[in-house]
Image (cartoon, helix red, strand yellow):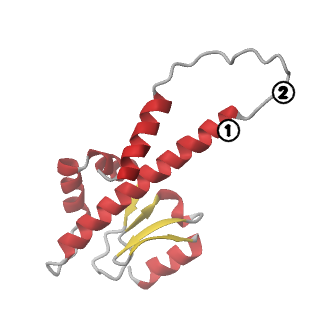
Amino acid sequence: MNRGAMVALALTATLGCQKSSPPPPNPSGVTGTVGGAIAGVKGAVERTVTLNELNNLRLFIDTASHSGKMPTKAEVMAAAEREDKKLAAFLADGTIVMTGTKSREGVWAYVKDAEVSSGYVVTSTGIERKTAAELRQMLAANP
């Protein structure tokens, strides 16, 4: 597990396991955005974990496709279920969308919202952030 994933896991465990308690008294009357800060940290942790799983997916597909044939969605899912439960969950719930391309030059996968807003896209060159229009153009060029 890389250092970024370990930090993300530690933050998730720390933030996700705290008991809910009422806010402390605020004698000054000044209101803050602590909830917003926590939500921001959780969002950053989720992005880090998702990027790690996108990288795991990219490495698997890259290795498997060197035999000259792209792995099918079913083959990737079976491997993820055996070796990377988090990736398998992301594929099953649609957090990561596989395209099923048969070409190494195509889009291999992308995060679920990338078709409507910007998001991360997995190709043979790596993981890149693309706009929705760029992703649609890439998908149309290499179905």
Residue 30, which numbered label?
Answer: 2
**Residue 38 percent location from the top left of the image:** 60, 36
- Horizontally, is 35 left or right of 8 in the view? right
Whether residue 94 is visible, yes or no, is no
**Residue 47 percent location from the top left of the image:** 49, 52
Q: On the image, which quarter does residue 51 sit in?
A: bottom left
For disc 1, the marked residue is 36
Residue 95 lies, with reference to residue 12, above or below; the image says below
CA neighbours of label 1 inside 10 A, class few (<14), some (14 to 19), many (20+): few
**Residue 36 percent location from the top left of the image:** 67, 38
> Residue at the spot x=53%, y=59% of the render?
113
> Residue at the spot x=33%, y=46% of the render?
89
User: Which type of secondary structure does the marked residue at label 2 adopt?
Assistant: loop
- Tag 1: residue type? Gly
Residue 62 lies, with reference to residue 11, above or below; the image says below
- Horizontally, is 53 left or right of 21 in the view? left
Q: CA distance from mark 1 to mark 2?
A: 15 Å
Q: On the image, which quarter does residue 134 sit in?
A: bottom right
Kindly give the residue lying farthest to the left in the view shown: 67
Looking at the image, tell me whether mark 1 or mark 2 is earlier in sequence order.
2
Q: How many numbered marks are there?
A: 2
> Residue at the spot x=44%, y=77% of the render?
139
User: Which type of secondary structure does the marked residue at label 1 adopt?
Assistant: helix
